[in-house]
Image (cartoon, rainbow, N blue to C red):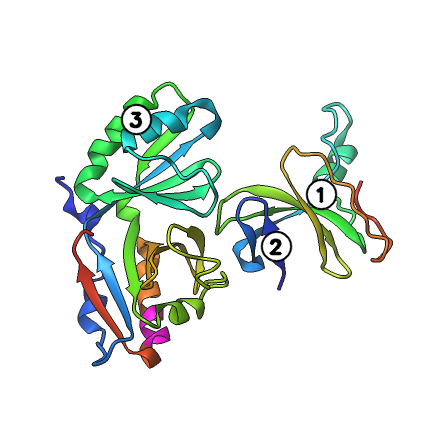
Amino acid sequence: MADTNAHRHGLEPFLASVESAAEARVRVGVVSDRGFLTLRLDPRNGAATAAARILGQPLPPASSAYTEVVHRVYWLGPDEWLIETGANRAAELISELSEALAGRPAAVNDVSGGHVSLRVSGVDARTVLAKGCTLDMHPREFGPGQCARTSLAKAVVVLSVADDAPTYSVIVGRSSSDYLCRWLAHAARPHGVRFSILQDT
Amino acid sequence: MLRIPCPCCGERDEAEFRYGGEVPGSIPQTDVGDEAWADYLFARDNPKGLVHERWCHSHGCGQWFHVVRDTVTHRIHAVYGVGEPRPVVDCSNESQADGGR
């Protein structure tokens, strides 16, 4: 892709200044080179099947769930999904989806430049996230495979559980990402926190 | 702080929602005159008791829906989607005033 700026997370100044704890019970990884698409369609008219064929995986039909096969597809609303994929796949996926959904009431848009993907893990990850989120984050209520668009501190995020280590995925608007990382650094300081850059995972 | 049961996402904190105000009556005919239009657009009942109001889960699924809330007790009696018929709400043990139309 010619415009590499679109996929830069822009957190370099923060990452250069943040202190790392010697013993980290919370680790925050900024995932680089991620691509994001929003997909909006009416799931009742066959468009969901057409989209699923291109994606190689079903759209999560149930609320508060995501599917992960080739890409990660998060349920955001009854007619809205967020697709997370590699930055180099986004453009190709858009043209394939647009072609498959042509003529139907559907929209697919590249929002890669507007989102930052974080991975929050470690033994105290849940405790720290629960400080800023009103969801019930007990594993019985919010476990692997589940996602929710909700508020974390004062930012709107797509929060999901990647595994029961636990590892949480936090997708946040790019303009809120610096704020949210500073909030995480502050909230996790008593637990020991280390920030890093993760390559496309 | 209210806990509002979103029809899509389940119970969430009030801070995730945008308030859309009391549901007005039906849209008047175009020839009814300014007074009826102004009444439809701006006047609300603001009852003490049950009120049908609109909420949008703006920090979640983004959907608008209706809530039947008691303005005295803050108890939420029912939620229903856009275009769904108004549910029958039994409030025999609550405040008696009914603002629903």
State which quadrant residue A13 falls in: bottom left
Q: If the image is split into quadrants, where does the N terminus of chain B sit? A: bottom right
The image shows residue A200 at horizontal and vertical percentages of 18, 51
Chain label for disc 2:
B
Q: Give the mark, 2 or 1, whose residue is nearer the N terminus.
A: 2
Callout 1–callout 3 Cβ contact below 8 Å: no
Mark 3 secondary-structure assignment: helix
The image shows residue B67 at horizontal and vertical percentages of 67, 47
**Helix, strand or loop: magenta stretch:** helix
Q: If the image is split into quadrants, where does the C terminus of chain B sit? A: top right
- Give residue B42's mark: 1
- Farthest left residue? A2
Mark 1 secondary-structure assignment: helix
Image side of residue A119 versus residue B5, left or right: left
Marks 2 & 1 on one chain: yes
Q: Mark 3 sits on what residue?
A: A98
Q: Real-space Cα distance between discs 3 and 2?
A: 36 Å
Report the span colored magenta: A184-188
Q: Real-space Cα distance between discs 1 and 3?
A: 43 Å
Please state which amino acid type lies under the numbered disc 2: Ile
Dot 2: few (<14), some (14–19), or many (≥20) neighbours within 10 Å? Answer: many
Mark 2 secondary-structure assignment: strand
Q: Mark 2 sits on what residue?
A: B4
Please state which amino acid type lies under the numbered disc 1: Phe
Q: Nearer the viewer, mark 2 or mark 1?
A: 2
Chain label for disc 1:
B
Callout 3–callout 2 Cβ contact below 8 Å: no
Chain label for disc 3:
A
